[in-house]
Image: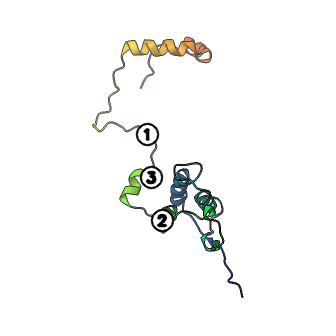
Amino acid sequence: MAISRKAVPVTLTAEQRTRLERLWFIYGNYGPKSTPGNHSFIQRLIENGIDERPLNTKRTPKSQIPTQECEACVDKILSESGHGSESDSRHAGRTLHIVPPSGKEQAQPSINPELQTILRDMNLRQPDTRERLNNEDDTPDAA
């Protein structure tokens, strides 16, 4: 009797999904280590939550099998818990944000008048902002 093979369902956390999407740009999607097997392997994990490695047999074409390097990277991501390590927390939210000054006083920085003039001239070149700036007065708002 034939062996019954089934794909393994995988539940991904938001962090794992994000890391797999980043990995997909290396091993899939025409990345530097892209192969058809790597591409479909990671894409099926992300989109469908299915690990299809148990379905591979000796007759599966080599081009459709993910590379060992890709499998190792994916397994590492899937085996990590949702807590993450220190190195992951440093890279978790790589977005730009404004950091407030560290001093107790948060004084307004002095603005160079020449820079203000240049910025105003640049803004006046934009037709939609020209009317708005001409209607504004130059007095600062009360704090």
Residue visible at 52% across and 65% down in the picture: 71
Question: 10 Å neighbourhood of mark 3: few (<14), some, or many (≥20)?
Answer: few
Q: Amino acid at mark 1?
A: His
Mark 1 or mark 3, earlier in chain: 3
In the image, taking residue 49 as reference, residue 83 lies left or right, namely left
Secondary structure found at label 1: loop
Above or below, 22 against 125 in this view is: below
Q: Nearer the viewer, mark 2 or mark 1?
A: 2
Q: Position of residue 11 (x, y in %)?
A: 58, 67
Q: Is residue 95 above or below residue 71?
A: above
Location of mark 1 (residue): 97
Task: Find the distance from the CA under tag 1 to the CA under tag 3.
Answer: 14 Å
Foreground: 101 or 61?
61
Which of pointers 2 and 3 lies earlier in the amino acid sequence? 2
Seen as rendered, the residue at the extreme bottom is 1
Q: Which residue is mark 2?
A: 72
**Percent x, y of residue 50:** 63, 67
Where's residue 122, x and y in %? 51, 14
Q: Earlier in the sequence, mark 2 or mark 1?
A: 2
Frontmost residue, 143 versus 123: 123
Q: Quadrant of residue 134?
A: top right
* Residue type marked 3: Ala
Residue that numbered label 3 is attached to:
92
In the rendered image, residue 141, in percent from the top left (x then y), is placed at: 45, 21
Q: In what quadrant of the picture does the N terminus appear?
A: bottom right
Amino acid carrying mark 2 in the image = Ala
